[in-house]
Amino acid sequence: MRSEIPFSGGRGGGSVRRAINRLMPSAPAKIGAVALVVLVVAGVGWAAFSSMRAPAFEVHADEAVAPSSSEPEAVEVKAQVYVYVTGAVANPGVYSLDEGLRVCDAVEAAGGLTEDADASTVNLARVLSDGEHIALPTKAEVETALAQGSAGGTVGAAASSLVNINTADASALETLSGVGSATAQAIISDREQNGPFSTIEDLMRVDGIGEKKFAKLKDSICV
């Protein structure tokens, strides 16, 4: 619908009015123009609003790091004992061995017995103790001990082994020269209070055993 502009005038007035009315937009055109402006404004506003929103982050399940279900296996560490192996072995020295092993294992760790060793004089089946000194005698040393009679004991007692002052009981200690019941008990009490003897010379720390008495004992004892 076109709005007509009234125009009054003479004869020429009608042609002028028609020219002006042709230049004026019709009502539908006005409505369309207004709608277009509204759409443009709405579009610009929505774009501005969208740009102000914080971006959303998606978390994908397959990207999540799952905790490992497998745990490292605990490594069992065995307790160690240190023993000093000397005498008739291939490689004398200090060795670290698993707790619970025996004298024979210490001898093997030291390279085994030498040809002149007398294995019958040592209890190879005994369980090792930490800090112990294992002395492997030679055949000549055992023969010397036998010749001396090993403190007046029987030949069988002397041949069984040198007396281990760390493990011998009172009766075994009393077979040693100059060792009676009182001295034997003093030896046992000392090793219970102070620990095993590291060397045979440690026997002199016991009350009643001096250098002279030790000189009579040293060829008949071991640790």
Image (tube, rainbow, N blue to C red):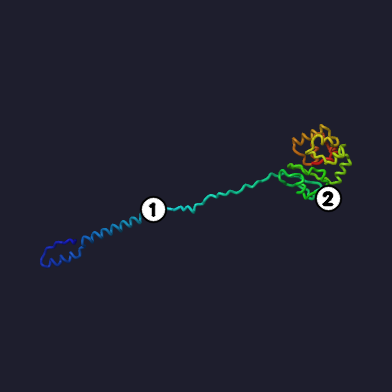
The reply to whether dot 2 and dot 1 touch (C-beta < 8 Å) is no
Q: Is residue 44 left or right of residue 178?
A: left
State the SS at label 2: loop
Which residue ends up furthest to the left in the rendered image? 10
Q: Residues within 10 Å of mark 1 (few under 14, many from 20)?
A: few
Q: Furthest residue to the right?
A: 147
Residue 13, position as x, y percentages in the image? 13, 66
Q: Residues within 10 Å of mark 2 (few under 14, many from 20)?
A: few
Q: Is residue 20 left or right of residue 134?
A: left
The answer to whether residue 214 is above or below residue 26 is above
Query: Please, which residue is most extreme toward the top here?
Result: 182
Residue at the image point whose x is 85% and y is 44% from the top: 142
Give the residue drawn at x 21%, y 62%. 26
Quadrant where the image shows the N terminus:
bottom left
Rendered location of residue 190, percent (x, y): 77, 35
Q: Nearer the viewer, residue 85 or 206?
A: 85
Which labelled disc corresponds to residue 115?
2
Under mark 2, the amino acid is Glu
Amino acid beneath label 1: Arg
Residue closest to the eye, 34 or 78: 78
- The reply, left or right, for residue 161 in relation to residue 53 is right
Q: Quadrant of residue 8?
A: bottom left
Q: Is residue 151 above or below residue 74?
A: above
Residue sitting nearer the eye, 155 or 51:
155
Q: Quadrant of the C terminus?
A: top right
Q: Tell me which numbered mark, 2 or 1, is placed earlier along the sequence.
A: 1
x and y, in percent, of residue 213 in the image: 85, 37
The CA span between labels 2 and 1 is 93 Å
In screen coordinates, is 105 left or right of 7? right
Q: What secondary structure is marked by label 1?
A: loop
Residue tagged by mark 1?
53
Q: Which residue sits at x=61%, y=48%?
A: 73
